[in-house]
Image (cartoon, rainbow, N blue to C red):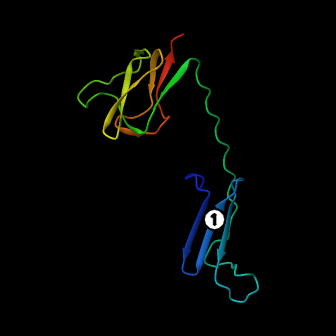
C-alpha cells in the first residue's frame, strides 16, 4: 500500500468483505465481515482461511530532498502536453547540456491539442541537465531542464 500510495483498499466477494485502511502512523488495519450467524459479536468473524492481521512495519521517513545547488534554476512546463527536444525528428535538439541560453532561447516544444508551443528558457545561464525524455508527456509545472543561472 505504501509503495503505491494507497490509503484504503476494499474487496467484496460473496458474503466476505475485506477492508484495509492505512492509518497516518503507517499501520494497516484489517476487518473481515460475514453475515450474522447469532454468535453475539455483531457479524465480525475471524475467517480461519485468512491470515491474522499483522501490524505493518512503520513506513520509512521520506528522505530529505537534496538542497538545490546555488544559482541552479529549473525551466518548468507551462502546460500539459508532449515534450519534444527538437522541431522535428530529423533535426538537432534546440539545446544541449553545456549550451548557454538567454531568456529568449527556445529550449523545446510542448505539443498540446495538435498545437506546437515553443518554450523559452526565461533565464540566462547554461543548461546543466535535461530532465524529460523526448516525446514523453509532461504535466503543468514539471521541471524540464536545469540551468546554472548567470550571475
Name the residue nearer the viewer: 67 or 141.
141
Q: Tell whether 44 sits left or right of 129.
A: right
Residue 149 lies, with reference to residue 65, above or below; the image says above
Residue density around tag 1, few if under 14, some if 14–19, many if 20 or more, within 10 Å: some
SS type, badge 1: strand
Quarter holding the C terminus? Answer: top right
Q: Tell whether 42 sits left or right of 2.
A: right
Count up the numbered dots.
1
**Image location of residue 140, percent across then percent down:** 47, 37
| Residue extending furthest toward the top | 151
| Residue extending furthest toward the right | 40
- Residue at horizontal 68%, vertical 86%? 36
Residue 45 lies, with reference to residue 131, above or below; the image says below
| Residue extending furthest toward the left | 90
- Residue at horizontal 50%, vertical 34%? 141
**Image location of residue 126, percent across then percent down:** 45, 16
Quarter holding the N terminus? Answer: bottom right
**Image location of residue 79, percent across then percent down:** 44, 35
In which quarter of the view is residue 89 placed?
A: top left
**Image location of residue 115, percent across then percent down:** 32, 35
The residue tagged 1 is 20
In which quarter of the view is residue 20 placed?
A: bottom right
Name the residue nearer the viewer: 11 or 2.
11
- Residue at horizontal 62%, vertical 57%? 7
- Residue at horizontal 61%, vertical 78%? 49
Q: Tell whether 1 sits left or right of 42.
A: left
Residue 52 lies, with reference to residue 121, above or below; the image says below
Amino acid at each position: 500500500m505504501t509503495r503505491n500510495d494507497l490509503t484504503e483498499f476494499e474487496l467484496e466477494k460473496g458474503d466476505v468483505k475485506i477492508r484495509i485502511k492505512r492509518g497516518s502512523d503507517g499501520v494497516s488495519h484489517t476487518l473481515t465481515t460475514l453475515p450474522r450467524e447469532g454468535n453475539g459479536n455483531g457479524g465480525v468473524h475471524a475467517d480461519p482461511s485468512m491470515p491474522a492481521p499483522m501490524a505493518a512495519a512503520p513506513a520509512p521517513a521520506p528522505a530529505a530532498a537534496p538542497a538545490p545547488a546555488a544559482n541552479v534554476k529549473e525551466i518548468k512546463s507551462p502546460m500539459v502536453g508532449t515534450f519534444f527536444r527538437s522541431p522535428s525528428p530529423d533535426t538537432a535538439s534546440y539545446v544541449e547540456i553545456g549550451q548557454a541560453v538567454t531568456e529568449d532561447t527556445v529550449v523545446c516544444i510542448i505539443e498540446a491539442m495538435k498545437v506546437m508551443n515553443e518554450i523559452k528558457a526565461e533565464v540566462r545561464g547554461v543548461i546543466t541537465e535535461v530532465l524529460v525524455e523526448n516525446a514523453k508527456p509532461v504535466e503543468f509545472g514539471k521541471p524540464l531542464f536545469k540551468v546554472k543561472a548567470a550571475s
